[in-house]
């Protein structure tokens, strides 16, 4: 199944396709081919617009937060316009009952939530991801940043979204699962082929996938990065389409997917 052009990696039998390119143009082509939508779920980890000369702490050392041109802020209005652009395309390629999860820090997530409301998404939950061992704040002028927010939304107010309540309750020890989740950062084994500066733990993505999809559902990640969502989908027996602009990260994601296929 080809969605826009030749993928850089595919396994059609097991339902995994990886694309290198601009997610806006790739999703435009997908929307042309599937005007009623094709994806059951989308996970997106968009730029946080943090690469503007700041510092942070990594492994006990002061390091720059600059991640690349793709993460540089263009000002609040342009950043918001970009969020509206890619979210509008995600909305088009979602099935009528599909949902989207978007992660971010305070620098971007409020814009994402506002853009969703402007576009007519139905906001379902905001998940607070707590990081047990966050890096210290070196300036000692702020609280230590220990959380990220993940917004879960349905395509429209009419959507009848998928939610595996029974499984989530089971995972929560027989109680309703709360919207505050604690996960450690990616383990060393998840970085053996290299790492992405905003890489998410596989366990976090596995919970998201299991919560809002069924086996063989089709998932999209328009900012694929190191391919964590792809790994989670392979483990959960879901089909996956990933799009990534940076060739180096496409290569990293491909190696992780190949390993996951061997282990699955």
Image (tube, rainbow, N blue to C red):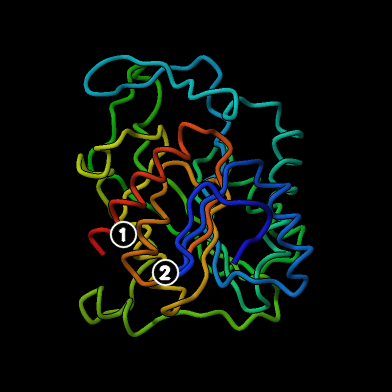
Mark 1 surroundings: few (<14), some (14-19) or many (≥20) residues within 10 A? some
**Residue under circle 1?**
261
In the image, taking residue 42 as reference, residue 172 lies left or right, namely: left
In the visual, does 256 lie left or right of 67? left
At 40% from the left and 81% from the top, the residue drawn is 164
* Label of residue 14 in the image: 2
Which of the 4 quarters of the picture holds residue 95?
bottom right
Residue placed most toward the observer, 30 or 45:
30
Picture residue at 30% right of the left edge, 80% below the top: 169
What percent of the width, then of the height, locates residue 16? 47, 61
Q: Which residue is painted at 55% across and 36% down in the image?
A: 48
Q: Residue at x 65, y 60 (%)?
A: 3
* x then y, percent, for residue 204: 34, 57
- The total of numbered circles placed on residues is 2
> Which of the 4 image quadrants contains residue 170?
bottom left
Q: Are marks 1 and 2 in contact (CB under 8 Å)?
A: yes
């Amino acid at each position: 199944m080809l969605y826009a052009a030749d993928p850089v990696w595919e396994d059609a039998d097991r339902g995994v396709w990886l694309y290198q390119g601009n997610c806006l143009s790739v999703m435009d082509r997908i929307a042309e081919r599937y005007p009623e939508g094709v994806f059951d779920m989308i996970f997106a980890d968009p730029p946080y617009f943090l690469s503007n000369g700041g510092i942070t702490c990594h492994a006990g050392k002061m390091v720059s937060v600059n991640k690349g041109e793709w993460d540089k802020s263009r000002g609040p209005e342009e950043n918001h316009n970009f969020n509206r652009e890619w979210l509008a395309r995600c909305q088009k390629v979602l099935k009528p009952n599909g949902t989207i999860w978007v992660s971010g820090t305070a620098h971007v997530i409020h814009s994402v939530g506002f853009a969703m409301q402007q576009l007519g998404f139905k906001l379902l939950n905001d998940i607070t991801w707590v990081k047990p061992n966050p890096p210290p704040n070196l300036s000692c002028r702020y609280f230590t940043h220990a959380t990220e927010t993940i917004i879960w939304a349905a395509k429209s107010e009419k959507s009848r979204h998928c939610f595996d309540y029974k499984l989530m309750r089971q995972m929560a020890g027989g109680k309703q699962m709360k919207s505050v989740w604690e996960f450690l950062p990616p383990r060393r084994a998840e970085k053996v082929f290299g790492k992405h500066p905003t890489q998410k733990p596989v366990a976090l993505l596995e919970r998201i996938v299991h919560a809002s999809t069924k086996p063989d559902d089709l998932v999209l990640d328009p900012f694929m990065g190191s391919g964590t969502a792809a790994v989670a989908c392979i483990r959960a027996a879901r089909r996956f389409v990933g799009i990534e602009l940076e060739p180096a990260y496409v290569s990293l994601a491909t190696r992780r997917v190949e390993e996951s296929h061997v282990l699955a």
